[in-house]
Image (cartoon, coloured by chain):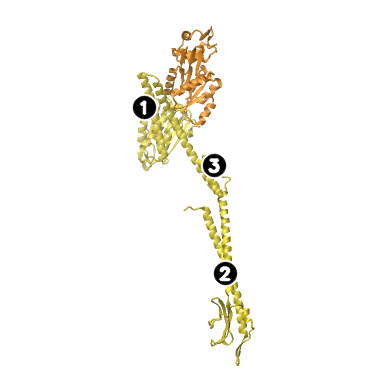
Amino acid sequence: MRRSIRGSLLGWYGALLTAVLAAFGGGLFWQAAAAVRAGVDAELDGRAQAIVAALEWDPREGWELDLRDDFLRGAGEGAHFGIWDAGGREVRRGGAGAPERPSGRTGVRERGEYREVERAGPEGTTVLVGRSIAPERARLATLRARVLGAGLGVLALALLVGGWIARRGLAPVEDLAAAAGRITERDLSTRLDVAGAPAELRGLASAFNAALERLAAAFARQARFTADASHELRTPVSIIRAQAESALRRDRTPEEYRRTLEACLRAAERMTGILEGLLRLARADAGDGALARAPVELAPLVEETTALLRADAAARGVGLRCTATPATVHGEAPLLSEVVTNLVSNAVRYNRPGGRVDVTLAPRNGEVELRVADTGVGIPADALPHVFERFFRVDPARSRERGGAGLGLAITRWIVEAHGGSLGVESREGEGSTFTVRLPASEGSRRHGVGPVPARA
Amino acid sequence: MRILVVEDEPDLSRALRQALEEEGFACDVATDGETAAFDLESWDYDAVCLDLMLPGCDGRTLLARLRERKPTPVLVLTARDALDDKVALLDAGADDYLTKPFELAELIARLRALIRRAANRPEPALAFGEVRVDTVARAVTRRGRPVALSPKEYAIVEYLARHRGELVTRTMIYGHVYDEREDTLSNVVDVYVSNIRRKLGRDFVRTRRGAGYIVDA
């Protein structure tokens, strides 16, 4: 069942009002009934006292009662009295509905439609006075009906008014919901008016706005990523198209066809690289990147990976030095090796002939720190915050000839962060860059890995 | 018609140059912004095909610099197809754009259209008495019969036809019919022109002694 705030507000309100009205109405009725009974009792008691006072014992005549004739008439229809002597014999009895004999207990009682008072008279006599209280009962019944009717009327009116108040009170919520609905179905750029919302809803509105903000940012990131990806793929596709179309315009020599096919192959290789990077990142985004973790000895991994890049470095006239202190981390070796490859090959590619790349692995403050420092072109300060973004390249055209699609550092950052580590960069344009990877050390490396071990060039 | 292709992808520029030259354009290629700026300064191209992403100098900057000096029509090649980018490009002075990947045939057709419009001659075929020059089919007819012309002869005929009624100097012909790599002797144009006269009639091209040539004065 769906709960509505207005429904439950109204329910609680109605229940409370019913209780109040019932207590009030019940109290009123009870008071009125008590007052009526007290009046009847006082009247009966007064009459009983009058009978007691008028009752006299004459040894010759027996019991004498000196009452006015209209005594009983004054009590109205259905009034009665009875007097019995100590032996229980009837002395007098009058009026309609008087009982045969006394109950034997003094006080007030109700018998059927009658209310009766029994008192002790002189010489052990018992005096009983009573009358029908049917008119009083009828009056009380009328009163009860009126109180009940009035109560129900008040309740109905109050519920109507309460419903209206609840609707009015909740109107800003509905307005807000409608505004939120309009925003989500049209565009994510508009926001709810927080200042204009009632105080109670400001928190909700600003939370909604914050969620929209994050959503819009995520959409924008996604859109930019898609745009960047298609942008990156457009150039190789246009190479393939232009080469093929140009070759097909007329008959060519085998040598010309060979050149065309080689160009197409180069473009296809470039697309493959971009697609692999994109798939990697898409998998990382999907959270499908659960790592197959195991203890990894980083020093040999760094040394072996760096060694693979030595030939490339030598070809570019870049000196590559590696200093690795034994250290163990908990992670996935192929991914960590990719981190080293990405960072070192960047450092080699964005370098100058005669430059240097220093790779240093050492424990530091309970973490394992890998530093890759180069003496290359460096990164301008305004570009530095963006280097880990996908497809970001300091000079889009220039790095193309160096063979990057701008995904390497984004992938590197993802791997490092998936290992619970951090990746940082410092750079000075024209002097070089230093990338620093910090990974949490596993137990093994904290035990052994303190103090540097002689460096290996 | 001479075209500058500004494109840093060697595989792409090679294919473009081949196709354009086979279509009878003289074609220069600049692979970076500085070279492109130098070429644009040195020659009067009939059209420029400009890739926006360039090393050394942003394509937009190049476009702005060109627009300060010359009205040369520019077709921009862009990898972005967002509307804003296209609007910004056209507003920045580009005459047309193509989104990568594009069809070579479309690129060539657009370049031809740009050149026609720039010469204030939007019609694709031009008639001079009994001679008709179809710049799309790149064919010339005389009295309804096709005339066989070498590519260079056609290029000169088309250039002269586009500048009908104007004096065209030899230097202008060199600048628009040959590309940077071609070594030209000063009398080569005269040889071509006399061939053209032989094929299209004496009266088609008139010589202004010491100045140049004129068609349909």
Distance, label 1 to label 3, CA atoms, is 56 Å
**Nearest the camera: B15 or A144?**
A144
What kind of element bears circle 1?
A: helix
Q: Mark 3 highlights which residue?
A: A191
Assess disc 3: are there few (<14), some (14-19) or many (≥20) residues with their C-alpha within 10 Å of its C-alpha: some
Query: Is residue B38 found left or right of A342 in the rendered image?
Result: right
Q: Chain of mark 1?
A: A
Q: Residue furthest bottom?
A: A60
Q: Earlier in the sequence, mark 2 or mark 3?
A: 2
Q: Is residue A349 above or below residue B209?
A: below
Q: Kindly identify which residue carries mark 1.
A: A311
Please, is residue A160 above or below residue A385 in the view?
below
Mark 1 belongs to which amino acid? Ala
How far across and how far down the image is residue A196, in percent? 58, 45
Q: Nearer the viewer, residue B53 or B157?
A: B157
Dot 1 alpha-carbon crowd within 10 angstroms: few under 14, some 14 to 19, many 20 or more = few
Quadrant (top left/top right/bottom left/bottom right) for the C terminus of chain B:
top right
- Which mark is in front, 1 or 3? 3
Q: Could you say which disc has been placed on residue A141 in the image?
A: 2
CA gap between label 2 and label 1 equals 111 Å
* Residue A36 % position (x, y): 60, 73
Seen as rendered, the residue at the extreme front is B144
Q: Is residue A391 visible?
A: no
Report, in whole angstroms, how far the alpha carbon at label 2 lies from the one at label 3: 63 Å
Amino acid carrying mark 3 in the image:
Arg
Q: Which chain is yellow?
A: A
Sequence-wise, the earlier of marks 2 and 1 is 2
